[in-house]
Amino acid sequence: MRVLFATSEAAPLVKTGGLADVSSALPAALRERGVDVRILLPAYRGVRDALAQARERCVLPSLAGLPAARLLEVRTQNGVPTYLLDCPALYDREGGPYQDGSGVDWFDNAQRFGLLSRAAAALGCAGSPLKWRPQVIHCNDWQTGLAPAYLHSALDARAASLITIHNIAFQGIFDPSLLTILGLAPATYSVSGLEFYGSISFLKAALSYADAITTVSPTYAREIQSEPLGFGLQGLLAHRAAALSGILNGIDTDAWDPARDPHIAEHYGPDTLDRKRTNKRSLQEYFGLEPDPDVPLLGMVSRFTDQKGIDLVIEAAPRILRLPAQIVLVGTGAPEFEDDVRKIAARFPGRAGALVGFDEALAHRVEAGADMFLMPSRFEPCGMNQMYSQRYGTPPVVRETGGLADSVVDCTPDTLAAGTATGFTFTGTSGLALLDAVERAVVAYRDPPTWRALQANGMARDFTWRASAARYAELYSRIAPSLLRA
């Protein structure tokens, strides 16, 4: 099976979020299963600097208002062949992949990711300039969403297409006047195509034309078929329910392993959980907290946004700290939330700590040093920190949504008896609902046998990419044969 994995970011070359981790780990896991998967990624300035050894494979000619581009090839550190789409006019610039240095979207994002989509589709056609021909084009989020539309319009299309929704809130909405520049057939601008309330939507194009649709957890696949989590696309997704499935993401269990994590104070495992206390003490020292080994320490590493529920933490924090408990908060986001987080740390010295910013090493230290991990997200397509937490013996407290619902088993007498309990879940969207779940967690924490059982259950969970890769490989084989034409 030959698969082109088209993505706008891939760790460690370029990363703004979880998509980059998926785009690195999933292709590697697929290759271990024997799938010939190759990545297609824009040659951003930082990517080209890191991969100076890349070799040119071909030139893709201009199309309509999209410029010509070179296709370079390199093998990444995890062994996955990667094609870099080199077009300096669109990608060779300071700033991030989607925004400039001041946080404003690039004015030409439609062309930048239209070109990425067009390149992906071109490699799936009979006229591809490469000898290697993919049977499936695996697209990811709106940035590659036009590829299925290009394939749909191409007379010589040979590949099937699959779109994975990592977060449906981001849809790639642009003015319909760009249709001609993008070189798309006028017929695609319709309710059954990429038209979306008078605009064009890259993501809707993929949902309309792809042969299969996946998202990153089974629960999220159900949630996006109705309001409010469908974000206007729920009707289309419900209509295409037969093509839609949810496949839970995995995590990088090499990078996130308490037995050999280079960022933490002391290594530990399921049989040496007492060593976790050293990491707790180290985290308390870092944030200037009272070095009390018995008071429960709650950690959160997150974007400070409504989606992530930081407002629920801010609301509940004074009552949580009076349980008693300690809290450390790490992240960036809306300025008002950043200010509120700083105020909590200032108001409760010795009991609350905050760092506004992101530090990868500190994220590992929080997972290892905290007793519990907070993830009160209003919606969460998959989430990874709740999986890291269980691997680190740090039971998570999560809102029951999306991938959080699929990966955390609420602690009840029945789940404890069955040996499946791994954390604490709640369903409300208030600080009181979060507080209730934290109170249950603190009660369990004060009962050492119960707490040790929770930690052991979580550390025994298999969150590797193997299961996900098997599901994707099966899906590829199911959609490719029906689309392959002589």
Image: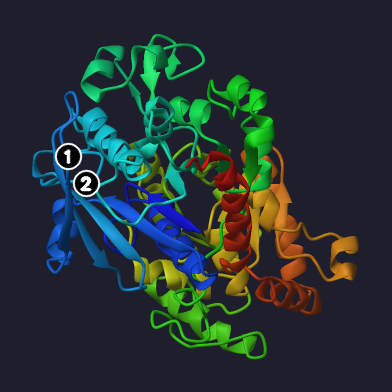
SS state under label 2:
loop
Tag of residue 486: none
Residue 102: horizontal and vertical position, in percent? 17, 38
Q: Is residue 381 above or below residue 207?
A: below
Out of 28 and 409, give the one closest to the viewer: 28
Q: Residue at image x 35%, y 39%?
A: 121
Which residue is the site of mark 1? Answer: 100
Quadrant of the rendered image containing residue 185: top left
Which residue is the site of mark 2? Answer: 96
Question: Of all residues shown, which one is farthest toward the front?
Answer: 486
Which kind of residue does numbered mark 2 sit on? Gly
Describe the colour scheme in one phrase: rainbow
Quadrant of the rendered image containing residue 418: bottom right
Q: Is residue 374 above or below residue 110?
A: below
Out of 437 and 17, give the one closest to the viewer: 17
Asked whether the residues under the numbered discs 2 and 1 touch, taking CB atoms below 8 Å apart as contact, a structural biologist would say yes
Q: Residue at image x 30%, y 61%?
A: 82
Q: Residue at image x 65%, y 28%?
A: 225
Q: How many marks?
A: 2
Q: Residue at image x 47%, y 86%?
A: 260
Q: Is residue 358 above or below residue 145?
A: below
| Left or right of 109 on screen, residue 311 | right
| Left or right of 314 on screen, residue 24 | left
Mark 2–mark 1 Cα distance, whole angstroms, equals 6 Å
Q: Residues within 10 Å of mark 2 (few under 14, many from 20)?
A: many
| Left or right of 427 on screen, residue 263 | left
For the question of whether residue 352 can be seen, the reply is no
Which kind of residue does numbered mark 1 sit on? Asp
Out of 309 and 118, give the one closest to the viewer: 118
Residue 147: horizontal and vertical position, in percent? 38, 35
